[in-house]
Image (cartoon, rainbow, N blue to C red):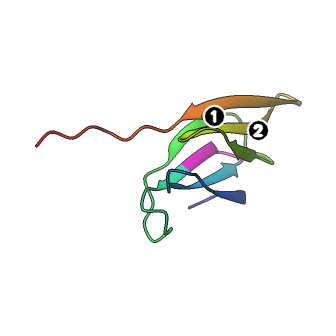
Amino acid sequence: VAGKLPSLLLLPNGVLTLLTAHTKLGCRLYLSTDGTGRSWSEAHVVSTASGGNTSMVGLDDGELLVFMPSNKRITCRKVELRRNATKD
């Protein structure tokens, strides 16, 4: 996982989240659905803007507020995490 100043947050639903920022890759979110951090999802791009100091706050079950720099100001995005439905 590439990035600087990573942030970890364990959500009430047991999902462990990892937020990173990278100058060329932007702001990315990774998920460990079992909450252990032993395995991670592929990157979910939150923003393609140049990365910097990022932060996140957990809201209700499965929701995050992600804060990141953007054009000399701070941008906030609400991210809703949903499990994919699978067919049997």
User: What span is in magenta?
Assistant: 23-29
Q: Image quadrant for the N terminus?
A: bottom right
Q: Position of residue 47 (x, y in %)?
A: 63, 34
The number of discs equals: 2
Query: In percent of the image, x 50 and y 68: which residue is there?
Result: 37
Above or below, 46 against 38 in this view is above
Query: In percent of the image, x 50 and y 50: which residue is there?
Result: 13
**Pointer 2 residue:** 68
Residue situated furthest right in the rendering: 72
Q: Position of residue 22 (x, y in %)?
A: 68, 50
**Pointer 1 residue:** 47
Circles 1 and 2: CB atoms closer than 8 Å: yes
User: Which amino acid type is marked by label 1?
Assistant: Ser
Say whether residue 65 is left or right of residue 2: right
User: Which amino acid type is marked by label 2?
Assistant: Met
Q: Image quadrant for the C terminus?
A: top left
Query: In percent of the image, x 45 and y 71: which residue is there?
Result: 38
Q: Position of residue 23 (x, y in %)?
A: 71, 47
Say whether residue 12 is left or right of residue 27: left
